[in-house]
Image: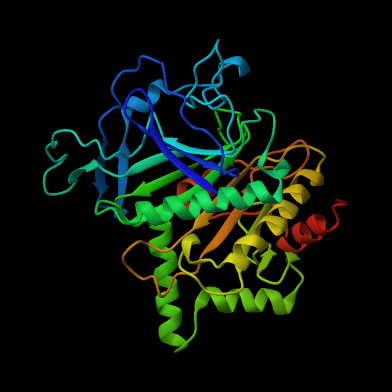
Amino acid sequence: MKRTVTHLADGRELIYYDERDDASRDAVDQRELPPPPAASEMRHDPILDEWVAIAAHRQSRIYHPPSDQCPLCPSTPDWQSEIPAGEYDVVVFENRFPSFSHRVGPEQGDILPGLVPTRPGAGRCEVVCFTSDHNASFASLSTARVRTVMEAWADRTADLSTRDDIEQIFCFENRGTEIGVTLSHPHGQIYAYPFVTPRTRQMLASARKYQGEHPGGNLFADVLAAEQADGSRVVARNAHWTAFVPAVARWPFEVHLYPHRQVADIPALGVAERDAFAPIYLEVLRRLDGLFGLQMPYISAWHQAPVRVDRDLAYLHLQLFSTRRTATKLKHLAGSESGMGVFVNDVRPEQAAEMLRGVQL
């Protein structure tokens, strides 16, 4: 794989990940762009002990452009996009409308002094384009291309983890207008947070408690082993990964993919584990699309260890879930889920796994 770093017209970084060593990446961004926005503002919620980012500049981000004006397609003589090249394999670049950024502006005064402190929203937000084909999807990628995407995830996680202002790296993909996607080109994102996220803090607190009650044990590893032994919710498995519907699935169709070896993050995966990921992940995605004969909307979220704390407790895994519960119905977060955080699932996890296994590929 060839890695080439360049910059866009406004100074944002762009990185090509090419599958050919002879790829030429000398195209220059010819657009006239305003300077990137300053970092957002973060406010700490003292009641929930969570940081909230206020990023008003994101109101002007691109929203459902026509296909001939897609900012993630390769540039042409008639249309200059975010990618100057006329073709590409995988590209990562700084988001033009970031929720977090290293471009920190002047300090703001605290909101409700003594109760709601503020901080600049330092960090980094990046866009990951999986292919130059506007009409493709992750499920339609080749195993070789998925391997390239994984190398990009690993490279960006490793690089971002060296920065003093970053505490956690989150690689994810949102697909489908039902999820809220505003650009249909196949892409994902990477958020580099200046704090450890609430979901990760909760998971690690549970893992710490479990380890205290089961000396030498790891909560994630034991859950994986139990799901493998039970088998009723396992959707797919190979020598290095197991995909299963968790017994406590919150979403109608939710699948977790675990490597068989405990590692903290994507860079820690070995060559064989990286090679084995693409076939099982593509199988799961194609099973999801085959459930109702349509492209399933989904969120695919990598859970990685924080950069500096509790790395021994964490266990890298991928959470994939869809908001679709039937061919014609979506699951909406209603009162219990949105107001109290208590999920009510309409589909038994065992039934969901059986349905996924039954899809003819």
- In the rendered view, does 108 fall on the left or right side of 234? left
Q: Nearer the viewer, residue 17 or 97?
A: 17
- In the rendered view, does 122 fall on the left or right side of 33? left
Q: Is 219 situated above or below 302?
A: below
Q: Residue at x 62, y 53 (%)?
A: 147
Q: Is 34 situated above or below 310?
A: above
Q: Quadrant of residue 353?
A: bottom right
The residue at the far bottom in this view is 215
Q: Quadrant of residue 67?
A: top right
Q: Is 320 situated above or below 20?
A: below
**Residue 260 visible in the picture:** yes
- In the rendered view, does 227 fall on the left or right side of 316? right
Q: Residue at x 72, y 57 (%)?
A: 279
Q: Nearer the viewer, residue 148 or 169?
A: 148
Q: Residue at x 42, y 21 (%)?
A: 29
**Residue 128 visible in the picture:** no
